[in-house]
Image (spheres, helix red, strand yellow):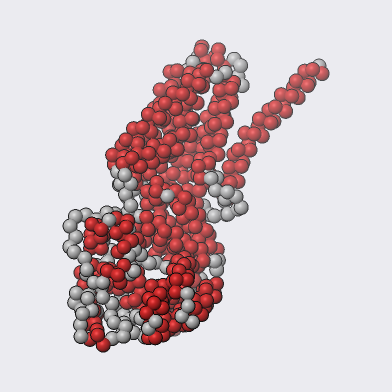
Amino acid sequence: MNRVASLVLCLLFALPLAARAEGDAEERTWHRLVGILQYLEADYPLAIESQSAFELAEQKSFAAEAVDAARGLGPAAEAFLPRVLAIQARVDQAQDAQGVSQDCGALVEDLVLAGGLARSPRRAPDLKQGEALYRTNCAACHAADGSANLPIAATMEPAPANFQDPELMGGLTPYKAFNTTSFGVPGTAMPAYPTLSEEERWSLAFFVFTMRLPACEGTPPQASLERLANSTDEDLVKAFGPEHLACLRRKLPTVDEERSLLAAREGVQEAMRQGAAGNPAAAKAAMLDAYLNGLEPVEPKLSSRDAALVAKLERAFLQTRLAAESGSPHLQDEGRELLSLLDQARRGSGSATDLVSTMWLTLLILLREGFEATIIVGALLAALRKMQATQHVRVVHAGWVSALVVGAIAYVLGRHLLAGAQREWMEGVAALLAVVMLVYAALWLNARSNMSHFMGELRQKMQGALGRGSMTGLFFIAFTAVLRESFETAIFLQGLALDSPAGVAWGSLLGVVAILALVLFVNRMGYRLPMKTLFNVSTVILVATAVMLLGKGLHSLQEVGALPLVPVPFVTVDLLGLYPDAVSLVPQVVLAGVPLALVLLRRKGRAQRVSEASAG
């Protein structure tokens, strides 16, 4: 019995390892296919131009290798096989050099997307390690200085690469060099180096780009590892100028934002492995970890730079997590698409924003996050003034000012203490608490609007109509209406402040001025409105805001895994708190429908009373 139990335990532990090994082997095949196509993209036109029989034969062998690799991937690459075969047919006939090169480049991009391939290292390569590896493994053929100026090199066909040659380096990227060291070049003296780890191969690949460059003097511009790994020297010169090339290649970045996105990427890959091993619970846990510890900490900064991409990422995370929870076979496809989006975000990571751009982004964020809260606070103030209860205005002011203080504390504490799951929990709970208080406020205002003798009583005994309980309620209404927006704004501004603290400061100043002007305008207009109109408009605003915050609060709790995902066909409007999920939509419909039903019932009752009075 003990032997059987031990065997079962061994099998259970071996399943994830086997799935991981299988996944790694498949990923290597994707990379191998991409690497071969990159060879053809760069070298096939040169072979056609030279009309060298040896080089043309070499290109034919590359094309045949590409077909074998595509077939080896099975159904996953079935859609791409006709395109690979079309490339092979032209290569075998030594035709269409430009077309083959363009088709290879386009196919590479599609394969990277389909395979969810990482085309950059997980952390900044160690150039000193790369130099030591070069001396040990490469200098015998390429020479110590990378020039390939050695007697043995003259005997090789084709000759070893000359890393001092600007023309050669102009068409080479570190990712291409990484693939070369990973798989070698069939039919040449360039071997593969399977004994080197992935980190060592990346270090070696990045090092060869420094060999023809002078020493770095100064600080390089901000550029992500994803961008550096997939850019030629010519690309970097065009983007940043020739004076920065040496520093870009010699001083590699360690960007916190990119590290977070890499953590998200590794979490998604782990979820894909667990899904393939038949472990949906572990796959779901890995997806939650990838989102909360990978994407969530950098989401504010990403949103300020590319809100559309962040929206795609969030949808992809939810879809992949749903596939993981249900054990769907589509997990692998959803995961690959998500990995591609993460790499797209990585390409832009580390890019700084100038003062003016940061200032305008800050202003827009403040206006966007503060608009609903401003309308609510303004409506409450206007209602109190209309009822001549101005002594309670200070309670409303104390509420929203307290919420701003909490936001300021969140800004000071930083994302390290209030990020990931903590932030989502905070936003979700704050939103649901705000819903309760806003519904209370709507009922409170609606009750006053239907009491014709309320104003007289209010003047005689204010304390009875707005007692201590009501004052506490007013405080919490104003506090919760502003709290979520205040907290969320603090997180967004902290991300922007990493690029331009001065821009955030000036933008915040303009935003505060704009919001104060809006409050004064709403307050003044509300004071001039008729009593019944004012209360009715205020009630609609409060209920609509409660419906919006209910959707956002429930969505936040879904993102931390506290609530399940139940997707339904619907649109996503984040600004209005609308998401295609029954867990948030159904309660929103109920919350919006109940006040409407009460209004209809009240009108029906009023009509019946009028009818009875007429009949009598």
Q: Position of residue 565 (x, y in %)?
A: 54, 55
The single residue placed furthest to the bottom in the displayed view is 155
In the rendered image, which quarter is residue 104 located in? bottom left
One can see residue 192 in this view: yes
Above or below: residue 567 compared with residue 369: below
Above or below: residue 159 compared with residue 223: below
Q: Nearer the viewer, residue 179 or 8?
A: 179
Q: Nearer the viewer, residue 234 or 334?
A: 234
Q: Nearer the viewer, residue 526 or 583?
A: 526
Q: State left or right for residue 498 relative to residue 384.
A: left
Q: Residue at point 49% right, 15% down?
A: 388
Q: Position of residue 308 (x, y in %)?
A: 47, 50
Q: Residue at point 54% right, 75% down?
A: 82
Q: Position of residue 562 (x, y in %)?
A: 48, 52
One can see residue 2 in this view: no
Above or below: residue 134 compared with residue 264: below
Q: Residue at point 23% right, 79% down?
A: 148
Q: Residue at point 27% right, 69% down?
A: 166
Q: Position of residue 133 (x, y in %)?
A: 23, 76
Query: How many numbered dots are placed on residues in this image?
Result: 0
Above or below: residue 111 compared with residue 467: below
Position of the C terminus, as image quadrant, is top right
Q: State left or right for residue 419 relative to residue 154.
A: right
